Amino acid sequence: MDKTKYILDEKKMPTHWYNVQADLPEPLPPYLHPGTKEPTRLPPPLFCEEINKQEFSKERYIEIPDEVQEVYRVWRPTVLQRAYRLEKFLDTPAKIYYKYEDSSPAGSHKPNTAIAQAYYNKKEGVKRLSTETGAGQWGSSLAFACKLFDLECKVYMVKVSYNQKPYRRIMMETWGAKCVASPSIDTKVGRDLLAKDPNNNGSLGFAISEACEDAFSRDDTKYSLGSVLNHVLMHQTVIGQEAMLQMEMAGHYPDVVIGCVGGGSNFAGLALPFMKDKLTGKKKNTRFIAAEPTSCPSLTKGPYTWDLGDVAGMAPIAKMYTLGHDFMPPPVHAGGLRYHGMAPVISHLAKLGFIEAKAVPQIATFEAGITFARTEGFISAPETNHAIRVTIDEALKCKETGEAKTILFIHSGHGHFDMSAYESYLSGKLVDYDFSDEAMKESLKTLPEIPAQFK
Ligand SMILES: Cc1ncc(COP(=O)(O)O)c(C=O)c1O
């Protein structure tokens, strides 16, 4: 038997982030200003200069500052594992590898960008960051990053997750952040919504509006986003660059690369460095599969069109696969996958045919997560279970065809704060939610009007 764990020396940790914009066959569409509908940068009151620069950079590699590398070294490089026990259980000839991002202090891939964003904001004199969080992984990552760089942090947590996961809030408070349930009374958009609908459970798109209003309304505050935008996806590419070296150590190159997608950042982090080989013709046949919930299926059901990044129209308009910014996803346990849109980079690559998407129902994802826990041992975040589901399905296809493919997936986070979700599955109470084409059609009615030259 070959090795189970591939451990990179700290000295091999990437010193640069990989920027896929340098290798795209066609450039990304611009962002449009929600008011003027003209191409725009990220709004400067929300984002610091360096982040804005990185968002539009075409440089292939951007140096990771020493101060950021120093913090990364607390848990990076992360381990790459071969899932022998899962392979054996599935009786598949496939070779399954996973890149294990749970070992960060917050328990997921999210600190890879949180640290970088906190560092640049601190350097430019910002005192406080505001953000939203779904499942709480992002909020806790930013809380941790802000504490290390001595910034205040305010987190608007989607109410359904706030109620499902009280310990995530306490984690944020442990790192000194303030966390409130969104919709909240702390913003005008929040108060307006609560006046209309006091029992509103919130959504990521709405929590973004609250966090943006917070940053717009204070001079000492900028906004920080944990997914979707180009710079966020780029910061995550430390994952894929490490995985490339580790796959080399293992003597295999992946035939299939899999990750779950909410806004697209963990999948991009693993996939984009391998995607470079596909885009440059070095490895033409690698497949990239994005796993999303059937209840919030932006890539598999949504149109590729211009939409607002948030409910209230404070963030720029982006071209992406979207269910409409008013779409209210059902309260699935994978709170981090309840976003109406998808990263422009992932949307663009999917549109050009470089990325496939698969939608999977909630119960099937927990079945996969339980199988993983009972073979490999690790208890995975509900989001991660989507990637595991698609991995298992691909491995079972290999069993049918007899092909010994190499499958690599990203284990984006642990599920230690998701025990109520597991309890719900184990006691047979977990439900699947239907996706309503009608509801999507309704929310797509509120897409912004776009000038003809951008259509
Ligand atoms: C563990 C985990 N995986 C995946 C995601 C989805 O986000 P993204 O698509 O940006 O990786 C989240 C978001 O909260 C998460 O917490």
Image (tube, grey):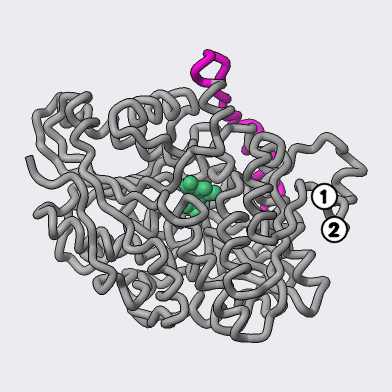
In space, the residues marked 2 and 1 are separated at their CA atoms by 7 Å
Q: Which residues are magenta?
A: 425-447
Q: What residue is shown at x 51% (from left), y 38% (from top)? A: 416
Identify the residue under disc 2. Answer: 187
**Image location of residue 420, percent across then percent down:** 58, 28
**Image location of residue 239, percent across then percent down:** 34, 61
The answer to whether the beta carbon of the residue marked 2 is less than 8 Å from any atom of ligand 1 is no
Q: What residue is shown at x 18% (from left), y 56% (from top)? A: 247
For label 1, the crowd category at 10 Å Cα-Cα, with few meaning under 14, some 14 to 19 and many 20 or more, is many
* Mark 2 residue element: loop
Which quadrant of the figure has residue 47?
A: bottom right
Identify the residue under disc 1. Answer: 184
Out of 428 and 313, give the one closest to the viewer.
Answer: 428
Amino acid carrying mark 2 in the image: Thr
Q: Is residue 311 above or below residue 91?
A: below
**Image location of residue 172, percent across then percent down:** 65, 54
Q: Which mark is residue 439?
A: none
* Mark 1 residue element: loop
For label 2, the crowd category at 10 Å Cα-Cα, with few meaning under 14, some 14 to 19 and many 20 or more, is some
Q: Is residue 196 left or right of residue 346?
A: right
Out of 363 and 35, give the one closest to the viewer.
Answer: 363
Q: What residue is shown at x 67% (from left), y 85% (from top)? A: 125
Q: Is residue 428 above or below residue 8?
A: above
Q: Is residue 17 left or right of residue 326?
A: left
Amino acid carrying mark 1 in the image: Ser
